[in-house]
Amino acid sequence: MQSVITEVPVAAEVAEAAGAAAGVAVAALVFAVVQLILAAGLYVWTALALGAVFRKVDRPASRAWVPVLNLWILFEVAGMKGWWAVVLIGGGLLTAVLASVTNALFVASAQNAAFGGSGGDAAGALLGATLVPILLLLVFLAAAVVLLLRMMGPLNRGFERGAGFVLLGVALLPVWASVIGWGSARWRGLSRPGLPPTPFADDPRPARSAASAPADTAAFAPPASAPSPAASPAPAWSPPSLAPATPAAPPAAPAASWPTGTEVEEQTVIAAHRRPAASLRLPNGQTVALAGDLVVLGRNPSPPAEAPGAHAVAVDDPTKTISKTHALLRRDAGGWSITDLSSTNGVIVGDGDSEIAVGTAVALAGRFLLGDAELFLDTGAR
């Protein structure tokens, strides 16, 4: 009778332990499934948001789904080498492996010191097992933060966003990609010191004509005094009779000396302006004649560094979408072209809806848009 009473509690304890173990196993399984679902959801969210960002920077949105390739593209868009993405991911994996191996070595050393009688310091080994992996992780995190800051800086400047978005991109990439990709941000390109040089960037003709003007007048001064010898015999004749004839002599003298000297070059320069006169129709209907070969447009434009002599034309913009210095018009032997000077709302040429690339000259004749403001270039061709 006593044996029955003692066996029942033992069986109950075994059953209770088995039930507890099953409950722990179920809870662990549920926790793992929840973690897997959350990780998959975070991956899908990040891929969709980065896909929207890639579309804005003219990159295939499908590449946002490839784990390392998406970071590779972000580094390239930021003006850095794409293989920094491999360095970042590979550094993280290497740090994890080193931390695990270091932890295992220190734990084994602590066990040998505690139970093997090796005389080592078990407490010191356990402390090393904790601190060394943490130090490795901190070193990697510091390097990763510096690298991400270096990438996020140009990216957010290209989207015209400030330091707050840089920190957001480093700390919470999915949130940053969502705000940039699905928000109102527009890609304006990386900042440039100036437009790429073109064959017509430095036109020597204005410099030569400006420099030749004083030389021509100085060279032409002596011929102008040539009629004075003809006037010198006048005192030999009767002064009263030659006084009215003196004004008639100068008109004939320039006619005789006109083919000589440098005045012919001045006439050539004037003849060069007989090209078709171009005009620009502004959004308010006003028409502006374009006399020069370089014209800068904007709300209050300033000539860019690569075209310091450009004629500034201020555009009254009721749409409020034109930048202060928006675009550059250039005329050369092939006709007129327009270049986007890193404007906020871009330049559209013709009847399409695609903005031209920043810093790239595009042939222009007729309708074009600065932001939402419509302008029309009449090249004067007949």
Image: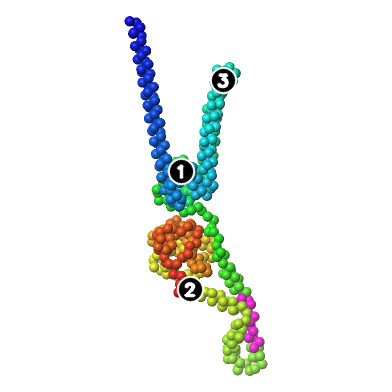
Label for residue 112?
A: 3
Residue 305 at x, y = what percent? 54, 60
The segment highlighted magenta reads 216-230
Q: Quadrant of residue 298?
A: bottom left
Taking depth in this image into account, of 290 and 299 the one nearest to the observer is 290
- Residue 161 in the magenta stretch? The answer is no
Residue at point 41%, 38% (across, down): 40
Residue 101 at x, y = what percent? 54, 29
Q: Is residue 229 left or right of residue 292?
A: right
Structural distance between the alpha carbons of marks 1 and 3: 45 Å
**Mark 3 or mark 2: whose residue is earlier in sequence:** 3
Nearest to viewer (mark 3 / mark 2): 3
Q: Quadrant of residue 18?
A: top left
Taking depth in this image into account, of 371 and 3 the one nearest to the observer is 3
Q: Which residue is mark 1?
A: 66
Q: Is residue 41 left or right of residue 265?
A: left
Name the image quarter holding the N terminus: top left
Taking depth in this image into account, of 198 and 83 the one nearest to the observer is 83
Q: Which residue is mark 2?
A: 276
Structural distance between the alpha carbons of marks 2 and 1: 55 Å
**Mark 1 or mark 3: whose residue is earlier in sequence:** 1
Residue at point 62%, 92% (across, down): 239
Q: Amino acid at mark 2?
A: Pro
Q: Is residue 169 above or below residue 258?
A: above
Residue at point 48%, 67% (across, down): 336
Q: Amino acid at mark 3?
A: Asn
